[in-house]
Image (cartoon, rainbow, N blue to C red):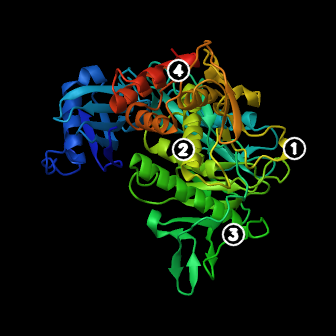
Amino acid sequence: MRTRTRTTALATTVALAAGTLLAVTAQAAPAAEQGGRPTPATAVARAEAALTAHAGELGVTERQSRAVRDVVIDADGSQHVRYDRSFAGLPVLGGDVVVHLAPNGAYRGADRASTAAPAVRSTTPAVGAGVAAEQADAALREANPGRTTAAPGSTKPQLVVDASHGTPRLAWQTTAAGLDYLGNPVARTVLTDAATGRSIASWDGLETAAGDGASLYSGTVPLESTVSGSTYQLKDPTRGNTYTGDAANKTDLCFGSICLSRAPATLFTDADNHWGTGTTADRATAAVDAQYGTNTTWDYYKNVHGRSGIAGDGKGSYNRVHYGSNYNNAFWQDSCFCMTYGDGDGSTFGPLVALDVAGHEMSHGVTSRTAKLNYSGESGGLNEATSDIMGTLVEWYAANPSDPGDYLIGEEIVKPGFGKAALRFMDQPSKDTKSADCWSSGVGNLDVHYSSGVANHFAYLLAEGSGAKVINGVGYNSPTCNGSTVAGIGRDKVGKVWYRALTTYMTSTTNYAGARTATLKAATDLYGAGSAEYAAVAAAWSAVAVN
């Protein structure tokens, strides 16, 4: 098994003008560390040289600039440098590229979100921002029927170069934000062709867990706190000062770069360092579950994958609990680097602060800092599946007898009136009546929480294999789409393969075919091209009709 070190996005921006590579804003790359191991700065310098040498192949053109998002250095010294690109100062959607280097710095290849050169002839729009704003407002209302209206001043179109949907074109990216008829926040992001005014694509402005959640029955759990005078704060100094606050049942309007207001989260404090009572009568109880969830997820990523915190920089995020009124959801927001949890309506769902929900939401943050999978189409399904897969692995990692590991999503929060035992079922996703078991050409048209079923099914088959069985007291019966019999390789290896693929090979536009390629590359890196693990990954994808 290979291990690696990683850094977070470096403050490094490189510009190309008239074919000439300008200076890197960081200092010149130092020599390799003791023992010949490359440093992140060395890796970036080598990647820059590779981009210059292979400019034609990689679509590097004049007027481009790029910024390093992430650097991964394997135990053997192989380097993987991930970039975002812009053109004439405009962000390029689908312009991200990962450069792969041998331990000695030799160029091995690259993975690109789009094979087209991210460039357009003109950056002057023929269609004004007002058209894009109206389109986004209409999309918001259509996606959220009722009295939903965009908040005044929230809809602000931004010019971008869209290379995610075929030939690169100038486009307006617009997020319309508002409140639905229950007073809960909603948002819709729309891409509008700046030449024709036609809608290119649209997606939810929030990455949500779609109503998955948890009870307040994780039992008595250990918590680290911060002493402040004579009181204790629910802030963990051992995990980047991750903390939990009370949103006081208020809502906010903050989506992406648009922040009109944000419900403040008042830090929980306590007199004796014993938090909550295990019931909803004490507002601190939900905070216990949320804090425990983020702590366990932090430990999983650090101890299993060597990642310190969501961004890999050792910095903590924060939780807001008791958000909104009877809010049946939980979500991650990259703009505040935080997780937010509703209390549920009490009849369909209980408070959404379960362990697998925390793992799910924090994993959205990891995805946003690595592959940054687009939240629409097949890449959106992979985004959601990543959170389901990693959230499930967090639950198994915890080995908490009060909430044993399983392959059910949100089973703890579901009330009898919901009609199903869980929100989603990884062994046979179609048991929720909406999710896809198998890939088809139309799977990308499903809501991302249902197109995720293909990857969830793949992950279950890869871990446990096909057929009927009882695992940890829960019965499963996972079919295959091609009639094959699949043998599993275990949860730990699934987690390692998926994390490697996500952080090293997937890009913002990766679809299911690309996920197959990325995970096979990851299996090769970890176990070898001729390994049983490689063969199992291939067989599991074929079993869900991804060939």
**The disc labelled 2 sits on which kind of residue?**
His
Give the image location of residue 329, x and y in percent: 71, 48
Neighbor class of circle 3 (other Cα within 10 Å; few <14, some 14-19, many 20+) is: many
Distance between the Cα atoms at labels 4 and 1?
35 Å
Disc 4 target residue:
541
* Left or right of 380, for residue 113: left
Q: Which of marks 4 and 1 is nearer the N terminus?
A: 1
Tell me what residue is drawn at x 78 percent, y 46 percent.
414
Disc 2 target residue:
364
Give the image location of residue 464, x and y in percent: 57, 31
**SS at badge 4:** helix
Q: Which of marks 3 and 2 is nearer the N terminus?
A: 3
Distance between the Cα atoms at labels 4 and 2?
23 Å
Q: Earlier in the sequence, mark 3 or mark 4?
A: 3
Q: Which of marks 2 and 1 is nearer the N terminus?
A: 2
Give the image location of residue 420, x and y in percent: 80, 37
Distance between the Cα atoms at labels 2 and 1?
29 Å
Disc 1 target residue:
417
**Image: 93 above or below 24:** above
Q: Residue 298 carries which label?
A: none
**SS at badge 2:** helix
**The disc labelled 3 sits on which kind of residue?**
Ala
Quadrant (top left, top right, bottom left, bottom right) of the N terminus: top left
Distance between the Cα atoms at labels 3 and 4?
43 Å
Query: Of discs 2 and 1, which sits in the foreground?
Result: 1
Disc 3 target residue:
284
**The disc labelled 4 sits on which kind of residue?**
Trp
Picture quadrant where residue 97 is located: top left
**The disc labelled 1 sits on which kind of residue?**
Gly
Distance between the Cα atoms at labels 3 and 2?
25 Å
